Image (cartoon, grey):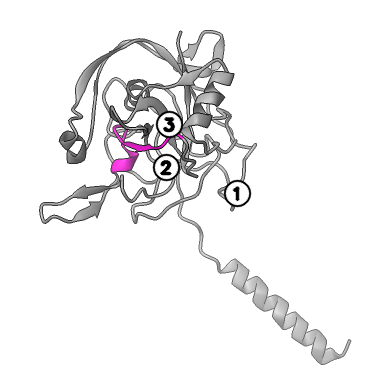
Amino acid sequence: MAPNLRALFFLLALSSAIVSCAQPAEKTSGRTDSSDDDTAADDDISLDPTPDVQRCPARPDMILIPAGSFVFRYDGERFEAEGLHDHAVDQAAFCIDEFEYPNQVGVLPTPVSWNDAQTLCAAEGKRLCTGEEWQKACAGPDGRQFTWGDAWDDQVCNTHTDQAQARQLAPSGAWPACRSYYGVYDMGGNVSEWTADVWQAGWPDMTVRGGGYNRNELNSQELKPDGFWQFTNYSQRCSSIHHHHPDVLMTDDGVRCCADL
């Protein structure tokens, strides 16, 4: 090879190395996986042992939620207008999946329709959670606003960011701090979750709880006094609720199964 060509290739290689080293570091977050592809499954996710968590008898993949009263909450004037109000619930003990279906750490949750969700849970000898069960597992006995606490923080769960930017679906357990009082993972962000409840009498729609990895335009806004809607973090709260037809399959709707003791 001619000397001038060797010199040219050397300069090109040196320039590429300099550009590579100059890339900015990513903002740190609550994630444990190091993959650049948020949609890839991650078999290397390792969660700290949680000895304080109560497991269900004969169902080690499920968390035991103890019996007790709590206030089932609705958020937003749209629910008040439709006759849906906060009310006390005396909830019996039940079991709930530790992760979103297929309930395996390091595996991507499966987007499903309500019909498919019901079938999948039944195939495992489980069932869909009621709205009351779901909210209690998310909010805990102290009635947290979000599954991690009362203060909004976009670095705890796989939610939309503070700038209302969507993330991508992540493997279950990739955000280890996204854990409820009872030890249930990812009840904020990742996928919203179908429940057994009919939206309203006379409607065909079924209810979906919680927020996903993206910004839900309809379910993340509130009406301001000036008559305009503004974006909020409502869809990530434990009281968040929206609805779809049972045949509808959305990429950000999944399921978490429950079971009786």
Identity of the residue drawn at 33% across and 52% down: 162
Let me know if residue 63 appears in the view: yes
Q: Residues within 10 Å of mark 2 (few under 14, many from 20)?
A: many
Tell me the kind of residue under disc 2: Gly
In the image, residue 125 sits, relative to residue 164, either above or below, namely above
Q: Is residue 14 left or right of residue 74?
A: right
Task: Name the secondary structure under disc 2.
Answer: loop
Q: Which residue position holds label 3?
A: 194
Most foreground residue, 121 or 202: 202
Farthest residue toward the front?
202
Q: Which residue position holds label 1?
A: 35
Tell me the kind of residue under disc 1: Ser
Q: Which residue position holds label 2?
A: 212
Q: Quadrant of residue 1?
A: bottom right
Q: Is residue 177 left or right of residue 236?
A: right
Q: Tag 2 or tag 3, which sits nearer the N-term? A: 3
Q: Residues within 10 Å of mark 3 (few under 14, many from 20)?
A: many
Most foreground residue, 258 or 171: 258
Identity of the residue drawn at 56% across and 25% down: 120
- The segment highlighted magenta reads 234-246
Q: Is residue 212 left or right of residue 101?
A: left
Q: Tag 3 or tag 1, which sits nearer the N-term? A: 1
Identity of the residue drawn at 20% across and 29% down: 84
Most foreground residue, 120 or 177: 120
In the image, residue 152 sits, relative to residue 138, either above or below, namely below
| Residue 176 highlighted magenta (yes or no) | no
Task: Name the secondary structure under disc 1.
Answer: loop
Of the two numbered discs 1 and 3 in the rendering, the one whose residue sits closer to the viewer: 3
Task: Name the secondary structure under disc 3.
Answer: strand
